[in-house]
Image (tube, rainbow, N blue to C red):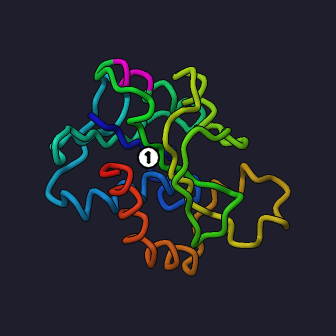
Amino acid sequence: MKIIVGLGNPGREFEKTRHNVGFMVLDAFKGARCPDKRWGFSKRFNANVINLPFSTFRLLLIKPQTFMNKSGDAVLSVSQYYKVDPCDILVVHDDLDLPVSVFRLQRGRNAAGHRGVESIMEKLGTKDFWRLRVGIDNGSTLRVDNPSEFVLERFSKCDLHTLRSIEDKLTSAVSNFLTK
């Protein structure tokens, strides 16, 4: 089994905010791979989940329904329940250090101040899992006094358009994690 985790905050007020780009990428991947499947809430994991066959293994998509800094709770419970090794987990999250059109697929890196990633590292006891870091910096962050407020703002129409224009590349990056 492999697990793909999209990070974000639950609730309508956080939809299309920069911090919820992980949810957005997972929704795009789901739309491309299994558009008829619906997210179901798992009380056991406190997450929205989709469980589906993929090639020679099972694939679990999860969107934790805790706030960002508690994301590790859901990831730990899912990985323990299914006995999934951290190297078979991909976490998709926002990255303030990358421009909006840039993303990186990496493994074993530090959290760089991202509270959701820190929570996952703390709960799993390792940083040896995959991450798809999706840029959210539109160049205005230098003028932002409080980055934690910036990440909770909605994307501008221009930035949202830019993200949608690279959706295929982002879903391909997720597929690359699954196949390579």
Residue 10, percent across and down? Answer: 46, 43
- Residue at 52% across / 23% down in the picture? 124
Report the quarter where the N terminus lies.
top left
- Left or right: 145 in relation to 19: right
Give x and y (percent) for residue 85.
39, 26
Most common SS among magenta residues:
helix
Q: Does the segment drawn in magenta span residue 162?
A: no
Which quadrant of the structure image shows residue 156? bottom right
Q: Residue at (14%, 57%) from the top-left corner?
A: 36
Q: Position of residue 123 (x, y in %)?
A: 54, 21
The residue nearer to you, when weighing 145 against 7, is 7
Residue closer to the observer: 117 or 56: 56
Q: Which residue is mark 1?
A: 6
- Look at 36% across and 64% down and name the residue there: 172
Q: Is residue 50 shown above or below 69?
A: below
Does residue 101 appear left or right of residue 139 in this picture?
Answer: left
Query: Where does the magenta region start and end?
Result: 76-80
Total labels drawn: 1
Residue 5 at x, y percent in the picture: 41, 42
Q: Amino acid at mark 1?
A: Gly
Q: Which residue is located at x 49 percent, y 45 percent?
A: 7
